[in-house]
Amino acid sequence: MLMPEQGQKNKQMIPTPGPGGGSGPGPQAPQVEKPNTEEILKRMRKVDPDQARRYRQRTGE
Amino acid sequence: MEKKRLVPWSVYFGLETEFGISVLENADIDVVEESIHLVRSASQLGSPNLWDYTKEDPHQDARGFRAKELRQDADEANFFSQDRQRPYSFEEIKSDFVLRNGARLYNDHTHPEYSTAECSTLIELIAQDKAGERILEECAKASSKKRRHTVCMYKNNTDFAGHSYGCHENYLIPRLIPWDRLVEGMLPFLITRQIYAGAGKLGWEREDHGMLGGYQISQRADFFTELVGIDTMNRRPIINTRDEPHANPKLYRRFHVILGDANLSEFSTWLKVGTTALVLEALQYERIPKRFFLADPLYAHRSISRDPKFRWEIELAQGGRTTAIELQNEYADWVARYVDLDHPEKEKVWKAWKETLRTLSSNPYELKDRLDWMAKFWLLQTFREDQNLSWDDPWLQSLDLEYHLVDRSRGLFYALESAGDIIRLTTDEDICQAIQQPPSSSRAFVRGKCIQRFSKDLINVQWDYIAFRFNGQTYRLDLASAFPGVDLEVYCEVIDNAKSVGDIVKNLNLKPMGN
C-alpha cells in the first residue's frame, strides 16, 4: 500500500549520472594519502578495453 | 570469527545472488549451456535434484491476494520455450544442488544463483556469502578445464546494456508488523541506504538499453520504476510484495528486498544487512515519523545514485529538503529508541552506521577501504588520470566489470583486498569453514548436516522442511519453528548424535506421512 504522502511525481527529469555525465565538474580527486598505485595500475592496463561491450546477459530477477 | 561470543538476532537473514557469466575467448557463448556445466561442477559439495519446487508460489502477494499473472511470466515462458529445444529436462537445466553448508546453488534465469544458508548472526552471513563466491570461483576453474575455455564469473548486477540480475536480501520477521507500516517505513530507508550499500557503476541504463558516461553509486537504481509490486524481472518495485515466508505463515513474513546491489566488500554487505535488520526490528514497535517520508521516492532513488557531487539532496513530503546522509542519521537515532543496542552485533552495526555517515559527510574518499562504490570510484579515477581518459571511455566500463570478477587472481576488488587496501571482517579460515559447514545458529545447520550424512535417504528439501525415507516410509522433518531458543537446539542435538535417519525418526518422534 502506498501512503499518500509518498505519492510520486512524474514530471521531474532524472539527472544523468556522476562526473562526466552530469552538470558540473564532479568531485575532486581523493584528499587522502595516495597509496602506491603502480601495482594496481599495471593490472588495470591489462584489462581488455572492449570486454564490457562484449559482455551480454539475460535479464534476471 | 569468535563463535563463542555469537549472540543470535531474533530474525533470520539470507542473501540470494545471481552471478554474471561469460567466456573470455568467445562472446557469443550459450549462457544456458555454460551455466549448467558450471553449477554441476559443485557436485562434490552437495546433493543434486532435491529441491522441492511444488511448494513455491511467487504469485502470493503480501497485500493479501494472489496475483493472477506476473509481468515476467511472458519472459519466463519465452525463455522456457527457447530452452525446451535443448536436450535437457527442466531439472537438468536448473541443476539444483543443496550444499553441505546448508546453501542452495542452481540456475535461475540462466544465471548461476547462490542462496546462502539462513543465518541469525551477521558475521556468519558474511562468511556464508563469501563461501558462495569461493565455490563459484572453483566451479569456474573446473568448468574452464573441462570445457577448454576460460569461464568468468562476476558478482555484479548488470551487463551495462539494460539487463539486470539481482542480489536479493531476505529477512524473516514477525507477521504482526502491519504491512502498511513496513512499506512506509522501509521506502525512505531503502532508497537512501545506497550511499553506503551501492556497488557503483559507470554509465546508465534502462530496460534493454545502456549508455556510457558518468559514474553512479548504485548498480540497480536504473532498473526500478515502481514503488510497490510483486514483480522482480520487469517494472521492478522498491518494495517487493512476494509473500513466501518459508516458515509458519501465520507467525512470520519474509521481507524480500530486491533493490540492493551485490557487494564484494564484506563491510558493505555487513552494514547493508545489519542496518536493514535494525530498521525492521524497530518497526515492530512503531511507525516511522512522517517527517521521514519522501516527496518522490522513485526520483530520489535515481537522483541520489547519479548525483555527481555526492551531496544526495532529497525533497521531503512534508516540505523542505534534506540529504540522504541526514535522513539515514535520523533513522539511526530513531532505531536507537526501540532496539536493544546492548546486543553486541547490533551495537557494532549501529556504531559503524553512525561513523560511516559521519565520514560520508566529511570526506567520503576515506571510505574507499570499505564501501564498494567508493573503492571502484577511486580505481576508475586513478586509472582515468593515468591514461588521460574521459569518463565516457569504454575502457572504464570494462574495468568496472573487472572489479566484480570472483577470480581472485584477476579481479580488481581482490587486487585491492590482497594489497591490504580493503578491510575484512572474516578470515580465510572462516570462509573455508563456511564452505564445508552450515551456520550453527539457524535451521540451516539441520539441512547441512542431513546433506553431509544422510543424503542417500533424502527425498526432497525446502527451506522449512526435509523429507526422507526410512523403512519404506516417508517422514518429514518440519523446520518451520526451528529457531534459536524455540526448537532449534533440540533438532541440532538430535542430528549431531544421529547415526542413521532411524535415530532422527525415533528421537524426534516423527510419524510417517501418507505415501
Image (cartoon, grey):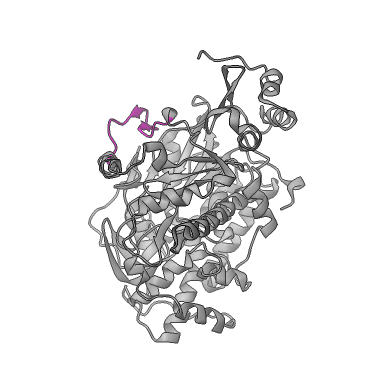
User: Residue B13 falls in which quadrant of the image?
Assistant: top right
**Place of residue B443 in the rendered image (x, y in percent of width and height, measured from the top left):** 62, 34
B96 or B360: which is nearer to us? B96
Q: Residue furthest right?
A: B4
Q: Residue at x 45, y 42 (%)?
A: B95
- Vertical placement of residue B506 versus B239, above or below: above
User: How many numbered markers are drawn?
Assistant: 0
Left or right relative to B60: residue B371 = right
Q: Is residue B490 above or below residue B205?
A: above
Q: Position of residue B26 (x, y in %)?
A: 35, 65
Magenta stretch secondary structure, dominant:
loop
Q: Residue at x 74, y 51 (%)?
A: B2
Q: Which residues are magenta?
A: B56-71
Q: Position of residue B267 (x, y in %)?
A: 59, 59
Residue B260 belongs to the span the image colors magenta:
no
Q: Is residue A16 above or below residue B427?
A: below
Taking the image as shown, residue B468 lies to the left or right of residue B389, namely: right
* Left or right position of B462 against A25: right
Asked if residue B209 can be seen in this view, the reply is: yes
Q: Height in image: B514 above or below B82?
A: above
- Corner quadrant of residue B242: top left
Is residue B66 part of the magenta span, yes or no?
yes
Horizontally, is B123 left or right of B272 in the view?
A: right
Quadrant in the picture for residue B456: top right
Whether residue B189 is visible here, answered yes or no, is: no
Q: Position of residue B51 (x, y in %)?
A: 48, 34
